[in-house]
């Protein structure tokens, strides 16, 4: 286990160069995810007008656009069919908020995290971060989850909340390459002590290949309070930007349905890869859009990525 005191010190030099929330990413914004000769990968979820998942579409139903230009699909894999193990492999991140603001809902949060681990398919990689004002990082494999479950039940609530820093640290350590990158965050969405700002983190997230699923708890914040609404808006923004969803359990009986929905989504996803038709290594942010040739569907995926900037010799 690695403990990082106010862990964003590792990332501040990068993050401070990023634009504030609402601005377009600058030419050198965010972490870099490959383009040019590297495959750009998208995890895609498709739902009908009633919200039902659509898992059986053919490759010909999909069109991918980068900055408005159509791209040729090079990789296509559906979770519902066998094979494509490398493309569909799951790299999982688990962020667990142990700050004082979670005191009233810690038991429910612990139960939620453990039930999730028991329900989720085996992950190729499992990176966990426990955080309050400090950030504690551990890496587990699928065969050694019992040790992680014990740590979850032993967690105590105390200290301030460095939620933004914890997410930024995870993004910096999530592995590139093939497979799906999924981050599940157990938190109330409040942040009191991060060094990275809201807008800076938003830009990091926009450039990341990670799909984020917040498990949002009410904690001690009153409903309708400005701080509560800001926390919920932040978590909703994380999910929408990355193609994920927000789940909000209030009691234990909510958990089975939440995890069933999350598992069904993971089992219905598509992985699409393409080689960009833009060979320029200019460090720019590129917008992505996936269209599906089916009536009244809703498509979820990450909204863009940043290409490497060619180093001057």
Image (cartoon, grey):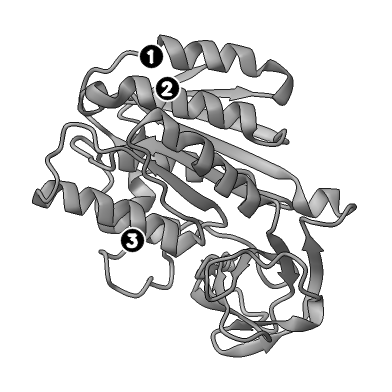
Is 68 left or right of 95, judged from the image as shown?
right
Mark 3 vs mark 1: give the one in front. Answer: 1
| Mark pair 3, 1: CA separation | 34 Å
Furthest residue in direction right, as rendered: 83
Q: 178 or 61, which is in the foreground?
A: 61
Q: Which residue is mark 1?
A: 155
Q: Residue at x 24, y 21 (%)?
A: 103
| Mark pair 2, 3: CA separation | 34 Å
Q: Residue at x 48, y 19 (%)?
A: 2
User: Dividing the picture into quarters, in which one does residue 168 lie?
Assistant: top left
Q: Residues within 10 Å of mark 1 (few under 14, many from 20)?
A: some
Q: Secondary structure at mark 3?
A: loop
Q: Secondary structure at mark 1?
A: loop
Furthest residue in direction front, as rendered: 253
Q: Secondary structure at mark 2?
A: helix
Q: Position of residue 256 (x, y in %)?
A: 53, 36
Q: Which residue is mark 3?
A: 18
Is 35 left or right of 78, judged from the image as shown?
left
Q: Earlier in the sequence, mark 1 or mark 2?
A: 2
Circles 1 and 2, Cβ within 8 Å, touching? The answer is: yes
Residue 24, can we see it? Answer: yes
| Mark pair 1, 2: CA separation | 8 Å
Q: Which residue is mark 2?
A: 110
The mark found on residue 21 in the picture is none
Q: Earlier in the sequence, mark 3 or mark 1?
A: 3
Q: Position of residue 72 (x, y in %)?
A: 76, 82
Q: Earlier in the sequence, mark 2 or mark 3?
A: 3
Q: Position of residue 66 (x, y in %)?
A: 59, 82
Is 76 left or right of 266, judged from the image as shown?
right
């Amino acid at each position: 286990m690695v403990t990082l005191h106010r862990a964003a010190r590792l990332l501040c030099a990068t993050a401070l160069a990023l634009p504030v929330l609402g601005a377009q990413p600058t030419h050198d914004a965010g972490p870099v995810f490959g383009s040019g000769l590297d495959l750009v990968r998208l995890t895609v979820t498709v739902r009908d007008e009633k919200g039902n998942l659509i898992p059986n579409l053919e490759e010909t139903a999909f069109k991918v656009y980068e900055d408005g230009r159509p791209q040729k699909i090079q990789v296509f894999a559906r979770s519902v069919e066998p094979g494509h193990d490398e493309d569909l492999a799951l790299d999982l991140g688990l962020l667990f908020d142990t700050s004082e603001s979670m005191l009233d809902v810690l038991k429910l949060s612990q139960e939620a995290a453990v039930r999730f681990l028991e329900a989720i398919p085996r992950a190729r990689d499992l990176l966990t971060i426990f955080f309050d004002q400090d950030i504690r990082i551990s890496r587990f494999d699928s065969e050694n989850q019992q040790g992680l479950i014990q740590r979850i039940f032993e967690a105590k609530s105390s200290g301030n909340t460095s939620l933004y820093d914890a997410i930024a640290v995870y993004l910096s350590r999530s592995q590139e390459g093939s497979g799906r990158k999924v981050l599940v965050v157990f938190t109330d969405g409040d942040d009191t002590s991060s060094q990275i700002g809201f807008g800076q983190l938003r830009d990091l997230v926009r450039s990341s290949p990670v799909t984020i699923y917040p498990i949002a708890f009410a904690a001690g914040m009153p409903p309708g309070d400005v701080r509560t609404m800001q926390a919920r808006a932040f978590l909703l923004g994380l999910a929408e930007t990355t193609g994920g969803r927000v789940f909000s359990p209030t009691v234990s009986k909510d958990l089975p349905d939440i995890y069933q929905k999350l598992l069904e989504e993971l089992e219905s996803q598509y992985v699409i890869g393409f080689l960009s038709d833009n060979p320029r290594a200019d460090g720019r942010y590129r917008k992505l859009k996936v269209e599906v040739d089916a009536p009244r569907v809703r498509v979820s995926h990450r909204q863009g990525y940043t290409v490497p900037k060619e180093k001057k010799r």
